[in-house]
Amino acid sequence: MIPDEGGASVEGPGPPTASPFDLLAYPFMPAEPERHGVIVQAPPDWRFDLSAFDRADTVVWGRMPEGSASLPSATRLAGLREVSLRTLGRRLPARLHVIAIHRLPPRRLRTGRLRGSVRAALRGGALVELASAEPRARVLDAVAEAAGVRLPGRGFHAGAGGALLVGGSLAEGSAVVLRVARAGSAGDPSALADTLEGLGRHLVPFTPRLYARGSTAGASWLAEAALPGRRPARASASLTREVAELCASFPRGNGAPTATAEDLAAVAAALPDRAPEIGALSSEVSTHLPTVPSILRHGDLWAGNLLVDRRGRLSGVVDWDAAHPAAVPGADVLQLVATDFRRKEHHALGPAFLARPWRLPEFAEATAAYWPAVGIRPDYDLLGVVGIAWWAAEVHGTLARLPHRAADERWVETNVDRVLTRLAP
């Protein structure tokens, strides 16, 4: 049992060893210090061990989506998941009751509606709230009260690093998004709050306004404006040009870019066997950057983080968790173009990098006005560095979000080793 300052006693691992499910479940723990909550991650076959629920006032049980399971395996596990969820209420001890079952869809590139729905049904996870009596205030409820946010009761999304994203409203009716994560965890939104404050100071359009931030019951949180619009199925050429124009207006950093070196250092730490090759690549990249101005990056710029109006025009850019104030110019625009290229060609990250998407006509068209706006005339070498910056950010983001990928030799060989081999002198 781990005493959590300002909140209930929580049984289970705390940061930095906590699993993604542990982190996502934390806001559903009881807020009162005298209450006892446990977080229990289900095994792949969705069996549950009743002995793990002993003495708990509140239990959060479930499992994250099965992102890497084969189709036959995912189908079998989905069947076991549904059986467990349907029979859970009848198999619990009398003192425990099912309060809510929250479905967790897998993170995915946008495909067709039917295909996406089938994939979500097969690979999805679930988070189940159990309680021994009338539900009491959760960490999430305490945070909402402190933020002055009214919650709808159900419905949330899993954000980067295990953060919980919940839509709500302020007392005067403005729609907001509340982000909550265990303080000090990978999903702690404090850095994101700094980014949103900076975007507000620079009056960058199409970005969320920060309403409030704070720390409550062991959780760090922020409340940001919910932007209007819907997520597009893909980034059209005209939408990509709009986004590139927006990227050109991002605040400039002080000095040369440092984001790529930090991304590569994080990748090397996660993959120590590849550290010498990654270090050599970082040194090579650094020789091209002293004269290049740095710029704020979004860091996860793809169609899923864009919002458009009814005409398909840009209305917002959301989810700034991977932002960095000193990035390589052009990397955000390349990420948008390359992600669409990956979707169309069904490429993993490594093969997509080896296809050199910075040479695509779509990227040239998108950046025709961008480069003059940021005061750069890119040459062959600089475009290659932009490509490495995009790849390094993607690998770092994946390993931060899905740490188990570091032990997946097939994933590492496809997306890291092939690239390092191609870039080796």
Image: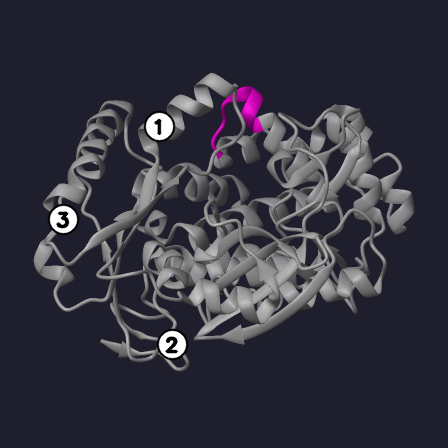
Q: At which x and y percent is residue 184?
A: 46, 72
Taking the image as shown, residue 386 lies to the left or right of residue 97, namely right
Which stretch did the figure color magenta?
Answer: 342-348
Q: Which part of the image, by quadrant, shows the N terminus? A: bottom left
Residue 63 lies, with reference to residue 334, above or below; the image says below
Q: Which mark is residue 7?
A: 2
Q: Which residue has dot 3 on it?
A: 48
Helix, strand or loop at mark 3: loop
**Front residue of this view, candidates 215 and 386:** 215
Helix, strand or loop at mark 1: helix
Q: Which residue has dot 1 on it?
A: 121
**Front residue of this view, candidates 29 and 341:** 29
Q: Of the residues shown, which amino acid type is indicated by label 1?
A: Ala
Residue at the image point whose x is 66% and y is 36% from the top = 336
Q: Earlier in the sequence, mark 1 or mark 2?
A: 2
Q: Of the residues shown, which amino acid type is indicated by label 2?
A: Gly
Total residue callouts = 3
Helix, strand or loop at mark 2: loop
**Front residue of this view, candidates 42 and 405:** 42
Residue at the image point whose x is 44% and y is 59% from the top = 268
Q: At which x and y percent is residue 112?
A: 52, 19
Q: Earlier in the sequence, mark 1 or mark 3?
A: 3
Local crowd size for mark 3, using a 10 Å CA cut-off: few (<14), some (14–19), many (≥20): some
**Residue 110 part of the magenta segment:** no
Using the rendered image of the protein, determine whether residue 364 is visible from the camera's viewpoint.
Answer: no
Q: Of the residues shown, which amino acid type is indicated by label 3?
A: Phe
Local crowd size for mark 1, using a 10 Å CA cut-off: few (<14), some (14–19), many (≥20): many
Report, in whole angstroms, how far the alpha carbon at label 2 lies from the one at label 3: 26 Å
Residue at the image point whose x is 28% and y is 74% from the top = 35
Tag 1–tag 3 contact (CB < 8 Å): no
